[in-house]
Amino acid sequence: MSLRRAAAEGASLCLGYSMAPVPCGAGSCTRQTDFPHPKHYLVFLRYQIYYGYPLETYLEYPIIIAQDVILIFCIMHFNGKVKRAFFYAAIYCGSWYMLTLQKCIIDMAMNLCTFVSAASKLVQLQHLWHTKDSGQASALTWGMAVYTCAARIITTVMTTNDPAVLTRFIIMLILNIWVTATVLYYRKTKKTD
């Protein structure tokens, strides 16, 4: 895979596009679309701030957002698309403001993020069932996603008890367990000669 193609695929993943699995040589590669995209971090951060939740519940989001913005800018710069990076930055800033114009907007955005994340996991599962091959999907990574969701459920219950956040993490926990089990089921054992 060329460096330009890898950068383009990285940019599309970072910008929140859900990439369908693509063939990689003789086998198939399964793209890990488990973790939230920058737009989801933006919504989570605004949601937590809007409802006045404790800083401990969202402190990592500003750091992750800054990291993703820098990464996106670098990828765009090396692809010769700096003007497009500034366009995305303007959309990002505009979205930050617009999310809290009305309570229903921030609530809808939070629910939409849950839907999009669930849909990406269902696409992942569909691909695994269709190919009957886990490809390069890592059971360890998906297992860590299960642990993260379980920990988030516990901390949400202990700090905010927010129903939208709890619903999101419960749905993600179930789907992460399902994907992990599917990856383990279709994992090919390596033969040693």
Image (cartoon, grey):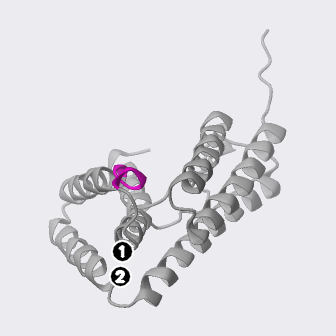
Q: Quadrant of residue 76?
A: bottom left
Which amino acid type is shown beneath numbered disc 2?
Leu
**Residue at which label 1 appears:** 50
Quadrant of the snapshot with the C terminus: top right
Q: Quadrant of residue 187?
A: top right
Percent from the top left, x then y, of residue 34? 57, 53
Which amino acid type is shown beneath numbered disc 1?
Tyr
In the displayed structure, does residue 36 sit left or right of residue 129?
left
**Are circles 1 and 2 on residues that touch, CB within 8 Å?**
yes
The residue shown at (40%, 73%) is 51
Q: Residue 136 in magenta? A: no
**How dense is the environment of label 2, judged by Cα within 10 Å: few (below 14), some, or many (20 and up)?**
many
Q: Tell me, yes or no, if residue 133 can be seen here.
A: no
Tell which tag, 1 or 2, sits nearer the viewer. 1
In the displayed structure, does residue 112 sit left or right of residue 87?
right
**How dense is the environment of label 1, judged by Cα within 10 Å: few (below 14), some, or many (20 and up)?**
few
Name the foreground residue: 184 vs 101.
101
The residue shown at (35%, 49%) is 60
**Residue at which label 2 appears:** 99
Residue 139 against residue 56 in the figure, above or below: above
- Magenta region, main secondary structure: helix
**Mark 1: which secondary structure?**
helix
Q: Which residues are magenta?
A: 55-60
Percent from the top left, x then y, of residue 179? 73, 50
**Mark 2: which secondary structure?**
loop
The residue shown at (38%, 91%) is 102
In the displayed structure, does residue 7 sit left or right of residue 106?
left
The residue shown at (77%, 22%) is 190
Q: Quadrant of residue 58?
A: bottom left
Percent from the top left, x then y, of residue 13? 44, 59
Residue 58 against residue 112 in the figure, above or below: above
